[in-house]
Image: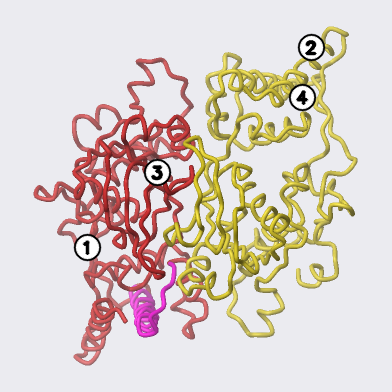
Chain colours: A red, B yellow
Amino acid sequence: MNSKGHKKLIEIAEKFYDQFMEGNVPSMQLPTRNKSNIVYDEDLKVWVYGEKNTTRIANNIGGATKLLKASFTIEFLTKQLNENRSSTLRELYYISESWREKEAKFTAQEESNQLIEDLEIVSGVRREDFHMRPEESGATVIGPLKIEEKTRRGEREIHCQEDVGEGGYQIPANTDRIKFIDHSADFVMAVETGGMRDRLVENGFDEDYNSIIVHLKGQPARATRRLIKRLNEELSLPVLVFTDGDPWSYRIFGSVAYGSVKSAHLSPELATPAAQFVGIQPVDIIEYDLPSDQLADADINALKSELQDPRFQNEYWTKHL
Amino acid sequence: MNSKGHKKLIEIAEKFYDQFMEGNVPSMQLPTRNKSNIVYDEDLKVWVYGEKNTTRIANNIGGATKLLKASFTIEFLTKQLNENRSSTLRELYYISESWREKEAKFTAQEESNQLIEDLEIVSGVRREDFHMRPEESGATVIGPLKIEEKTRRGEREIHCQEDVGEGGYQIPANTDRIKFIDHSADFVMAVETGGMRDRLVENGFDEDYNSIIVHLKGQPARATRRLIKRLNEELSLPVLVFTDGDPWSYRIFGSVAYGSVKSAHLSPELATPAAQFVGIQPVDIIEYDLPSDQLADADINALKSELQDPRFQNEYWTKHL
């Protein structure tokens, strides 16, 4: 049983109970989780949630339903921890369909994912400590790095170049089970797309340039971001982020280097402020006369949204966006 | 240089040229690629394309544009083979934006993917021989199986239980580079979702039941289907397919066991007719009073489409669907 996650969840439930007993309307306070409320932490050099708060309060149907869902989820999680089991985020969404209270059922997986993040923030415990896993992301590592992964089957020492196929070493959901044993790398190359990652591997880029190639697989999973941060901090390796040249790519870089809006409460553990951008810049398309695609409306909205995103408010990004 | 793929591509281009020189309108004949034209091959026990043909002919703008795109793609592929390079399907789509003839640009990746499949059918050569790769699928294997993968860095012997982390061994795009060295498995368990795969691994299912767990990752990539077929045929291992209980899951099973509609020209190499279904059956939901979700319109359409799908025209499936 995981005592820390369990204890914190019970505390939240107890608070609801106390509020009821004192004749107060139960409520839960959270930082506002959108880009209007992320601020730059000068010490940590990452973006975290600011001072603005949102209160979920049971004095209207919407608020009451949210707290009902939170209660059922807390019950589910404590039971899971008692039985030493784990689930994925997707499973929680489906499992909610069998809850006796129909109102507690989630309408979309987005909603249950967000609630788990809310509980992380309120409890100060990461979802790994609730035994909640994401769907496997399939992101991989290849390069001159020897790790030890603590598995339920004992320790495994794996050299991420010599002991793996061309697919590389698969990053597990909980990267804190990995210990770095040895390496001879000069830097980390984090790559957005599988095609580019495969081409670099095909050309022996990791061998010729002593680099650790990490596949981001689009918007990178927490485990991938955590691993990049640890490679940067524990092994003092520079990190380069290589993306496509489209509006979404800048967000991918932002989530690696600055911290993501959705999980800004974890930025200190997940973001790598020293990461550098080496993708195609919009100005390169003009300077090198590269072929380009008409931006779709969704792309233009993404750009507009980035221009209002506090993480991109510096000279470099406002010019390029 | 890959001589087989190259030779076949040039032959297609030469045929267009000859048609022009003889004063004929260039055309290309293909089997009709939808579920109305797949037939069961009694010998191979898989579904392949039937007798119906579709002709792409340049006597109208639509047909002419299709052949123009085919010509540009053939030029791109032969150049790539000459230079011994490779690309992904997604890259081909983006690269078409830089082609000098604007009309040859693909409107969606779906279109360029389909054209590559068309060229496979006409040439009788697989896209691997054109050096075209899919985006990495991230599907994995874990279990008592020792393989040797031929990589550009030499041969790698990997035991898919002892030499990997909990993420498992990553299936490479070209599984024909894998040789089976040794195994002590009783059967193969192919699993649709990452959550279920992780739970089985967490519970040591592969160790307790001597099974090789293959993660399908939704609709499985060609490489995954090819590997399953090889495990079945070369090692005589029974294959169980474990899916969710929704209309899409039956298609996933269908593509593993019967062959997929999209790549029916490759069914003899990709489909595993001996595969057995062990997922949730619709009747189980009623018998065991399982919680279920309202089917969305898209789900109902998927079911209707399956009822008209020749692969599902047997007593078992018509009853359950």
**Residue A64 falls inside the magenta stretch:** yes
In front: label 3 or label 4: 3
Q: Quadrant of residue B116?
A: top right
Q: Are marks 4 and 1 on the same chain?
A: no
Relative to the observer, which residue lies in front, A53 or B96? B96
Kindly identify the amino acid type of the residue bearing the numbered disc 4.
Gly
Residue most extreme to the front:
B182
Q: Residues within 10 Å of mark 4 (few under 14, many from 20)?
A: some
Gap in angstroms between the C-alphas marked 1 and 2: 67 Å
Task: Give the position of the N terminus of chain B as an image quadrant.
Answer: top right
Q: Which residue is mark 4?
A: B63
Task: Give the position of the C terminus of chain B as an image quadrant.
Answer: bottom right
Residue most extreme to the left:
A43
Q: Which residue is mark 3?
A: A161
Please tell me whether mark 1 sits on a helix, a strand or a loop. strand
Q: Are marks 2 and 4 in contact (CB under 8 Å)?
A: no
In front: label 2 or label 3: 3
Gap in angstroms between the C-alphas marked 2 and 4: 16 Å
In front: label 3 or label 1: 3
**Residue A15: x %, y % from top left:** 22, 83
Relative to the observer, which residue lies in front, A231 or B207? B207
Kindly identify the amino acid type of the residue bearing the numbered disc 3.
Gln
Q: Which residue is mark 1?
A: A31
Residue at 84% in and 55% down: B45
Does residue B201 lie above or below B127 as drawn? Answer: below
Please tell me whether mark 4 sits on a helix, a strand or a loop. helix
Q: Which residues are magenta?
A: A63-88
